[in-house]
Image (spheres, grey):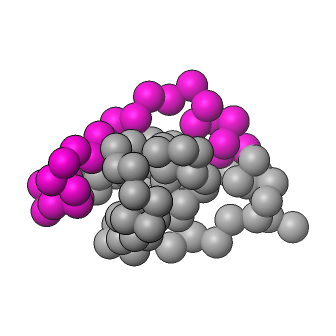
Amino acid sequence: MTQLTNKQKQYLKGLAHSLRPVVLLGANGLTEGVLAEIEQALDHHELIKVKAATEDREMKRAIMDAIARETGATEVQVIGHIQVLYRPSKQPKIELPKAK
């Protein structure tokens, strides 16, 4: 998991603004298939949005924590049901502002 500075998080939030969620969690919750899809999306895009369609706040938080933990991605932000995740790939596509 990458530690991001506030400046880097702000930069990633700006990039994520126009993105659509690439993975939608349905009634089945977090399955192996869903995790594999998230892994693949992170490898390909580095910065993704995941939508968890559950009304239960604690359940939603638990699912989002599990996604970040299982994928090794950094949570950039959560807005409502949308989680923004970042994980640099082996050949990084996104150049982050330098950490001070």
Front one among 39 and 90: 39
Residue 73 shown in magenta: no
Residue for point 54% across, 44% down: 80
Residue 78 lies, with reference to residue 23, above or below; the image says: below
Q: Relative to 41, is 76 on the left or the right?
A: right
Residue 81 lies, with reference to residue 73, above or below; the image says: above
Q: Relative to 46, is 100 on the left or the right?
A: right
Residue for point 22% across, 56% down: 29
Q: Is residue 92 visible?
A: no
| Residue 81 picture location, percent across and down | 46, 45
| Residue 96 picture location, percent across and down | 68, 51
Q: Quadrant of residue 94?
A: top right
Range of magenta residues: 11-36
| Residue 62 picture location, percent across and down | 40, 70
Residue for point 40% across, 57% down: 56
Outermost top residue? 18
Residue 67 lies, with reference to residue 95, above or below; the image says: below
Front one among 98 and 85: 85
Outermost front residue? 56
Residue for point 87% across, 67% down: 100
Residue 45 lies, with reference to residue 17, above or below; the image says: below
Q: Relative to 97, is 47 on the left or the right?
A: left
Residue 30 shown in magenta: yes
